[in-house]
Image (cartoon, rainbow, N blue to C red):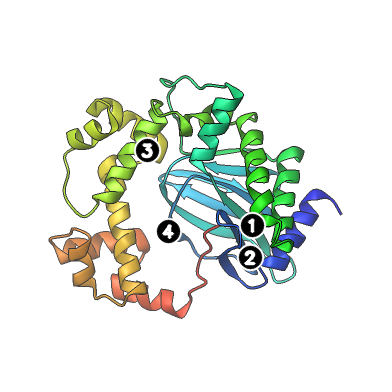
Amino acid sequence: MNGLSELSSLIDRFAPEDGSAPTALPRLHLARMTSPTQPMHSVQQPALCIAAQGRKQMILGDRIYTYEPSNYLLVSADLPVVGCVMEASPEKPYLGMRLDIDQSALAALMLEMDRNAKPNEAPGSGILMSPLTGSLLDAAIRLLRLLEDPCGAPILAPMIEREIHYRLLTGDQAVRLRQIALADSKLSQVNRAISWIKQNYARPFRIETVAAEARMSPSSLHEHFKAVTAMSPLQYQKQIRLQEARRLIVGEAVDAATAAHRVGYDSPSQFSREYSRLFGAPPMRDAERLRAAPEIGVAV
């Protein structure tokens, strides 16, 4: 059995039903889909994503990324994305894994390796793609094998995750990945702005306030924020507001007017227009559609 076949077999075993699910390993998530999916909106945190079988597309603003077994996708910031499975069937389902990046462990490993990214380097897009190497694939397989070893997993999983971080830090995206852990890198400054917006999404803000939080000038923040997220800070805030409103309406059965108010909208009609523009249907109709087809998307 070759590497991708074994990885597919492991995911198939531990994700037997359609959907996305966590595992016994806290940062590892698996996904299975037996048919292509409709686009699903989510906020993706820094993570390594591998499609062991099938093909998936991730959209960030106007940028489109398609990943399949020959490559991996790396997310370097908390990003509002749209994902959909493009290639899947009952005979050959989409099988994917996501490993969330442990940023503290990444920073500690960087210090041990004595490798540094220049903090003033432009961060570029928050989503990156590279060929899947044999060494990275092998480490991913060994991580999933630990799902068969509940006694050994708590001891061995951190060691294999550390190896995966090492493979990424010495691979094609090494410079960008190291910027995640550098406190004074442009990417870390953008991530501070992202974190502030996520915590304060329901209230108006001035760009100067966010820039001060990121320790950047307003013009520098706007430039680098858009490079990473493909949107402005205000556009990012709108995405977070609308996704949270959707969660309230679908997950907590909150009515549209209440959800709009909770996420910071003063005008219900404006909320409905912007919600429809993003999700393709007015709030309550969208909620009915999602409740009728909860498997409409997959987040890995």
- Percent position (x, y) of residue 172? 63, 30
Give the residue at the far right of this rendering: 1
Name the amino acid, label 3: Asn
Circle 1/circle 4 CB separation < 8 Å: no
The residue pinned by badge 3 equals: 191
Choose the circle earlier in sequence order: 2 or 4: 2
Q: Residues within 10 Å of mark 1 (few under 14, many from 20)?
A: many
- Percent position (x, y) of residue 1? 87, 54
Choose the circle earlier in sequence order: 1 or 2: 2
Task: Judge from the rendering whether residue 169 lies leftward or rightward of residue 203; answer left or right.
Answer: right
Choose the circle earlier in sequence order: 3 or 2: 2
Q: Mark 3 or 1, which is nearer the eye?
A: 3
Along the viewing direction, whichever of 103 and 206 lies nearer the viewer: 103
Choose the circle earlier in sequence order: 1 or 4: 4
Quarter of the rendering occupied by the C terminus: bottom right
Q: Is residue 299 above or below residue 160?
A: below
The residue pinned by badge 1 equals: 96
Give the SS element for disc 2. strand
Give the SS element for disc 4. strand
Circle 1/circle 2 CB separation < 8 Å: yes
Give the SS element for disc 1. strand
Residue 32's disc number:
2
Q: Residues within 10 Å of mark 4 (few under 14, many from 20)?
A: many
The residue pinned by badge 4 equals: 41
Along the viewing direction, whichever of 19 and 88 lies nearer the viewer: 19
Q: Mark 3 or 2, which is nearer the eye?
A: 3
Circle 3/circle 1 CB separation < 8 Å: no
- Spatial CA distance of label 3 from label 1 is 26 Å
